[in-house]
Amino acid sequence: MSSLTPLEITQKASLIWEQKAKNKIWKTVLSSILAGMFIAFGAVFSITSISWLSWTIPFWITKLIAGVTFSLWLVLVMIAWAELFTGNSLLIISKLDKRISRLEMIKNLTIVRFWNFIWALIVVGLCYLAWRHLFGYPAITETISNIWIQKLNHWFIQAICLWILCNILVCLWVRLARSGKRNSDKILWIIFPITAFVAAGFEHSIANMFYLPFAYLLKIFNIIPETINTASITIKNIFINNLLPVTIGNLIWWIVFVGLMYWLIYKK
């Protein structure tokens, strides 16, 4: 397995994100649409992989399966070159190299964030329609319920720590994946950090764009079992208590931990 040096990775990242920032808007929109769909597909793969597992299976095995299958979305993003909001936070490297302007960076992040979310919501609707025949079984709804109960019931400091810990692992994934010269190398580097953050229950803003709206849709159509309290599934809780702070935490940590620190070490 051949790999790039840390300096070469940083130089490569600067060029890659310069190209992303200077892309035509319609290209950015299409790439963002793909990433929004990819993350939803990873979530669907993860949900269906663990929903019918026997309760006798050890908990750690369930979490391991959930993490490995969820890695699908980042494999698709990396290999198929889609634009993901959290990954595009590394535009800061190109900004520090003075390859792009502040306005180009903000414009790209805004467009990517919006279309990531829109197409995650569209896949939520498609999954609801496709899975209607499964809602008579408790497996799918129980899995979704366990996910949103965990995500919407963090206390503030706990949530911040979960966001930061997630981004440390995801940022390391970006560095490791960019070091590989072959697609097989990149896939190998992707699986372990992503499996780790999913298994540990850390929070990722783009993933939550699928999980939480899907739970809300199930609540609207009264599909969640009556034994489960759905009071916390509200628009306010989804956006104000989770998506907004998770986004801020993810974005800041990407910029500081990966972008700024590695630029200072290997380019400054």
Image (cartoon, rainbow, N blue to C red):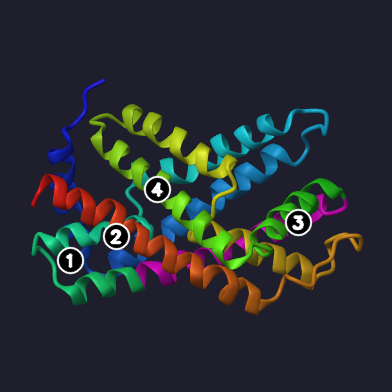
Q: 10 Å neighbourhood of mark 1: few (<14), some, or many (≥20)?
A: some
Q: CA distance from mark 3 to mark 2?
A: 32 Å
Q: Is residue 8 magenta?
A: no
In this rendering, would 71 be left or right of 30?
A: right
Q: Quadrant of the N terminus?
A: top left
Instruction: Estimate how packed mark 2 is, as few (under 14), some (14 to 19) or many (20 or more) residues with alpha carbons within 10 Å.
Output: many
Q: Which span is picked out in magenta?
A: 111-136
> Residue 7: percent from the left, percent from the top?
13, 40
Q: Which residue is mark 4?
A: 168
Task: Tell me the kind of residue under disc 3.
Answer: Ser
User: Which percent across, then down, holds residue 62?
Assistant: 68, 34
Distance Cα–Cα, label 3 vs label 1: 41 Å
Give the amino acid at mark 4: Ile
Instruction: From the image, give the main secondary structure of the stretch colored magenta.
Output: helix
The residue labelled by disc 1 is 22
Percent x, y for residue 205?
A: 49, 61
